[in-house]
Image (cartoon, helix red, strand yellow):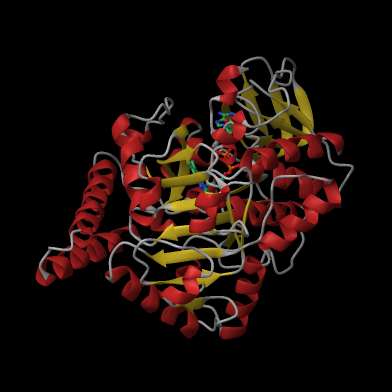
Amino acid sequence: MQAWRSISLWMDQLEESLSPRTALRQDLDVDVCIIGAGYTGLWTAYYLKRQAPHLNIAIVEGKIAGFGASGRNGGWLMGNMLGEDRLLADCTAPQRRAAYDLLHGIPDEVERVLEREGIDCDFRKGGVLYCAARYREQAATLRSYLQKLYKQGLTEREYRWLSPAELATQLRIATPFGAIFNPNVATIQPAKLVRALARTVERMGVKIYENSPARDWRPGEVRTAQGTVKCHWVVPAVEGYSVDLPPLGKYQMPVQSLLVATEPLSDQLWDEIGLSRGQAFSENSRQVTYGQRSADNRLVFGARGGYRFAGQLRENFDLSEREIELRRYLFSELFPQLKNVAISHSWGGNLGMARRFRPHMLCDPQHGVALAGGYGGEGVGASNLGGRTLAALILEQRNELTEQPWVKRPGRVQHLARWEPEPCRWLGYNAIIKSFVHEDQTLANPHSAPWRRRLASAVADFMEGFMH
Ligand SMILES: Cc1cc2nc3c(=O)[nH]c(=O)nc-3n(C[C@H](O)[C@H](O)[C@H](O)COP(=O)(O)OP(=O)(O)OC[C@H]3O[C@@H](n4cnc5c(N)ncnc54)[C@H](O)[C@@H]3O)c2cc1C
């Protein structure tokens, strides 16, 4: 079982046995067949079973529950959704307010389930600090983002500017220029959550088959090597792995994100750094960084990885020295005292990025297909909303979950925005990332001339425009 433990720090920390459940070795006839035992699949099963206990639900998982991003992520459980400001731009003010309330309530909803089901996943709702931490321009970017949110009707209760002195009461970094604080974010131990959810839905009567990759699927049928599942509803919940299940790969691009974790740090170091309530934090650059102080006092810190030609999945996440050192450099800029600290774990995973960075929840009742995804790197909380929403859609409910702009109802997979074919996708993605890296290097260099700094940011802004 060592192979499963090496997936991430989080899987390594589990005390339970990781022996796979039995594989599917027969044909089945069920109401709902879910492909993939990550958060999306498991939350969908959970909310379906709670409301309709009679439903016969089977989950086929290619490896083991939590093998995917759900067992590897940075543990930010956000009351947000990627690109929410753009998704809600055309709504009326009351619709937008209701949508934000729904999103901001995600961590509380998860906490209610944890309490109800007796799940311990080191849940701490300490909020998140988006820090201007490495160069002055980060403060200007954050402040203009804050103004955009206020124009959308959000208030200081939800997003608040912290001066360097105010930030220091929560997090002490080397060169603070200020931060945005958002209280609607929790940190968790991700693998504890996904593994406990699997046990919970099993207790409710859902059958999980592991080591049972779906080879192909179509409405009404999912085929694995040793058994075919006939069903009224198929719920493909494979997010970053969509490339292996046509036609889903046209709509979800797999990108990687990579993390490192330190050995547990001393109380003295944490007294210097802060994060005493388990706050999540990032330094707000286009490197997409994210960190948390784990419940056992490690610094866990990640940053964007890459994209491989034709959406090839990365399978080997033994990080190279360069990949580890980039992350060490980024966190040492914030915490110079951690420059030489021992790194005990490094890992990464594949996540699904939808075209225009717009997550979706989709229901096609005519063909019996429901799916949610494209969360980008923000799916820990969004997948809970996804599971709740798919359950409501399958149960033919109409409520605030089903009336959001990210819900396509009725909608077919083919109605989602497609990624460009190769080699455009690879060339485009890498050109954009190069502009981001160039911007970051230019701004991080205090000797860069002002015109160079402005030019680097203008190019990165322009390139980012293609993503949206
Ligand atoms: C390194 C990393 C860090 C991240 N950090 C954060 C974070 O801090 N906060 C945040 O909000 N989001 C984060 N994310 C994103 C978040 O983890 C994901 O959006 C979320 O876990 C997606 O859950 P899922 O169930 O949709 O997909 P997954 O968890 O990837 O589950 C998909 C499952 O499908 C299985 N599968 C694949 N193909 C098949 C097949 N053919 N047949 C059967 N089963 C199959 C896989 O084995 C896997 O178990 C991160 C992602 C990564 C990779």
What is the number of callouts on the image? 0
Q: Which quadrant is home to the C terminus?
A: bottom left
Q: In x, y percent, where is residue 290? A: 46, 52
Viewer-proximal residue among 238 and 4: 4
Taking the view exactly as shown, the residue that stands out farthest to the front is 268
Q: Quadrant of residue 323?
A: top left
| Residue 375 showing in the rendered view | no
Q: Answer yes or no: is residue 360 visible.
A: yes
Q: Quadrant of residue 327?
A: top left
Residue 215 lies, with reference to residue 165, above or below; the image says above
Q: Residue at x 71, y 28 (%)?
A: 15
Q: In terms of depth relative to the viewer, which is nearer, 219 or 280? A: 280
Question: In this view of the protein, which residue sits in the foreground, 412 or 370?
Answer: 370
Q: Which residue is found at the position 26% from the left and 65% from the top?
A: 461
Give the percent coordinates (x, y) of residue 210: 68, 23
| Residue 361 location (% of width, % of height) | 59, 55
Image quarter for ligand 1: top right
Q: Residue furthest right?
A: 54
Front residue (pair 66, 121): 121
Residue 241: x and y in percent read 50, 35
User: On the rendered image, what quadrant is the N terminus found in?
Assistant: top right
At x 48% / y 71%, what residue is drawn? Answer: 167
> In this rendering, would 361 be left or right of 435?
right
Residue at figure coordinates x 72%, y 29% from the top left: 230
